[in-house]
Amino acid sequence: MNTENNEPRKYNRYDENFKRSAVELLLQGGQSVATIATELGISTQSLKQWKKQLAALPATGLGQRSLGQLEEENRRLRREVRHLAQQRDILKKTLGIIATPSGSDLNV
């Protein structure tokens, strides 16, 4: 109960589409949980709870994957991108060394 005016506290009810949209914003990255929650007018705990609930739901429909599966794939792809970037950098350095003329070649 609200102690100031003895009225019961009102809770907002959000539909499933709103919850999914909020979680999608969170998963897109670029903004923190607190920023998204403030923009949507919800608590950070609600947003975290919705994310956890949606991750636990099984995939629905043909070819769709659960939130947990998508997050795991995202982690795997990020690791692969880091690995490929390291390989690219090594190749660039190697080519730079090979392409640089040595001191004995300059006297020709």
Image (tube, rainbow, N blue to C red):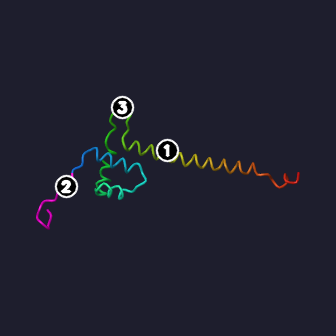
* Residue to which mark 1 is pinned: 77
Q: Give the x, y percent position of residue 24.
A: 36, 47
Pointer 2 local density, CA inside 10 Å: few below 14, some 14–19, many at least 20:
few
SS at mark 3 in the image: loop
The picture places residue 107, in percent across and down from the top left corner, at 88, 54
Q: Give the residue pinned by disc 2.
A: 11
Residue type at mark 2 is Tyr
Residue 52 position, x and y percent, is: 32, 49
The secondary structure type at the circle numbered 1 is helix
Query: Which label sits in the foreground, 1 or 2?
Result: 2
Residue under the image location 46 percent in, 47 percent down: 75
The residue under the point 66% across, 47% down is: 91
Query: In the rendering, at what x and y percent does residue 71 appear?
Result: 41, 45
Q: Which residue is mark 3?
A: 62
Residue 33 falls within the magenta-colored stretch:
no
Q: Is residue 4 magenta?
A: yes
Q: Nearer the viewer, residue 77 or 2?
A: 2
